[in-house]
Every structure is written in C-alpha cells, then in structure tokens.
Amino acid sequence: MAIDGKQGGNIVLTSGKNIVRYNDSFYSETFGIYFKTGDIEARGVSNRVYNNTLYYNGQDSQFYGDGFGEGNEWRRGIVDMCDQGSCPDNIVMNNIIYGTYNNYDIFFKSSNTAVNNWLSTDSDPQFVDTTLSDPTSRTQPDFTLQPSSPVIDQGTSLTQANGAGAGSTTLIVDDALYFQDGTWGSALADHQADWIAIGTVGNVVQISSVNYDTNTITLTVPMSWSDNARIWLHKISDGTQVLHGAAPDLGAHERASSRCACDLNQDGVCDWEDWRLFSRDWGRTDCP
C-alpha cells in the first residue's frame, strides 16, 4: 500500500481481532497503520499486527505539521488515537518501521504492546531498493532483504503452548489471535488455513480450526510438543512459506535460505529427524 505524498494515511483498523501481516505500508502523509474508533461499539482493539514493513511514513504533511495533536501522533509509523474510549490489547510485533518522519515510529494512547520491532533508530535494514519517485511503479520500491540484512532470522515466536501434547491434535496456546483457519476469507479467493511450527521451526502442521474463546487450535494431524513450546507461523493463507532458517525475518519479506532438499526441519543437517518427518507424511494425497 502506498500514498503518493498527499493528505492521508494507509491502513486503518476500526474493528477488533484482525490479523494484519505481510503488508508493505509506505510513503503516507500521516500514518502507516492506525488503530481508531469507528463508533462506540466498533474500535480497533485486540488486533495482532506482525511482520509488516512500514517505510517513510508521515513525510509530506501539508495539513498536519509539527506540533499538531499530542506529540505529532498523526505522523507515525503505527499510531493508536481512539477518539471515543480507548483501543487496548493490540500487539505490534516483528515489524520493520523505518524511515518514519523524525523517527516518530510508534505512538500509543491505550494499553497496547510493541515487541521486537526494527525501528528508525536501529541500523539500516538493507532493503533491495527504496526508490519512491514513481508512485505508479509495480517494481519500486522493493522491500526484499539483501543477503547481509541485519533483520534476517531476528523474528520472535508469536505465542507458546499452554501444556504439553503427545500425539495430539488439540493445541492450547497462550494467544490464538495470531492465526486463522481458512474460514475468514472470501469464497472467491484461495484462502487456506495457516501452517504453524511447534517447538522447533521444522515441526510443522496445518491448522484445522481455531477456537478463539478457549485459545484452542485443532491440528490436521497429531503432533507432540512440550509445555511452553514456542509457536511460529510457517505458511500464510495463500500457502506461501514465511519461515526459513532458524527464525522468521522481521518485516513482510522472508528471505528464503539455501538448504539441502533433505533438510526438512531446516536445522542444517540431513538426519533421522528429517526421515521421521518424511515418513510421517508418506502416502498423503492432500499436500498443498
């Protein structure tokens, strides 16, 4: 998403429990992502905003100059400015928020959480191409990461298991709001349930369903894990793999690492654990 330097912002969230991930938000006059009030009953609460790339936002302020509002809150990468009540319980994680006007990256009025984000005061994340001269271009900017980028493999896990499991399809987690089971999207789109990694980045499985009231994820095949096992996103709703290497990259563009085809669990070694993963799925006819 991009605004070509005119008045306006990019992504606005006026409702709750949305998943906002793997978006580029750049060159807005004001905000990159905004939590706000739609009406008394509709507020930007309990959203999970992770692995987005926000670049060069808040730059062309014709109407919202320095000193407008509370601490230039309109000219931010990510901002919470609910005008009726508050917009709490939003979590902002594993994003790149870089090049924001005057380093005004994040502003919260409510009780929200920002964890493990790469900010304007950090070093250059090393995008491939940050050219913004043509707002109609389909190739520029290119926020793919260069091989030497410091944000590669710097993402943290999203949540953790609440209790151990042995050959189970029922996984209870601390926070299920990061994931979706394929029932949210339009029937016209190829919208698939997420794949997750449990405990290790190579121990992957697709989600069958999610109960957000009980933070319970039902898996398509039985898996095993320990209590407090870390949980990562492995594939998003279009089937794209977004976890390569030892950990996810920060931002919206996961850089695929070069590895042996036999290294199924991506630990750098072809061994019995890879054979176990291979044999577990042998004979399946429903592979994506």
Image (cartoon, rainbow, N blue to C red):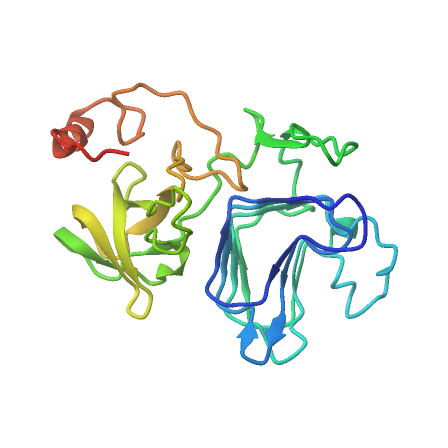
Residue 159's image quarter?
bottom left
Q: Quadrant of the C terminus?
A: top left
x then y, percent, for residue 99: 72, 44
Q: Write the residue at 42% across / 25% down.
A: 257
Question: Which residue, as the protein is rendered here, is positioned at the far front?
Answer: 188
Residue 147 located left or right of residue 220: right
Q: How many marks?
A: 0
Q: Pick the residue in front: 27 or 261.
A: 27
x then y, percent, for residue 227: 23, 57
Residue 252 located left or right of residue 31: left
Q: Write the residue at 17% across / 53% down.
A: 169
Residue 14's image quarter?
bottom right
Q: Pick the residue in front: 189 or 147.
A: 189
- Above or below, comparing residue 76 to residue 273 in the picture: below
x then y, percent, for residue 21: 50, 48
x then y, percent, for residue 136: 72, 34
- Above or below, comparing residue 9 to residue 71 in the picture: above
Q: Pick the residue in front: 114 or 196.
A: 196
Residue 121 located left or right of residue 169: right
Q: Quadrant of the N terminus?
A: top right
Q: Write the residue at 51% across / 44% down.
A: 22
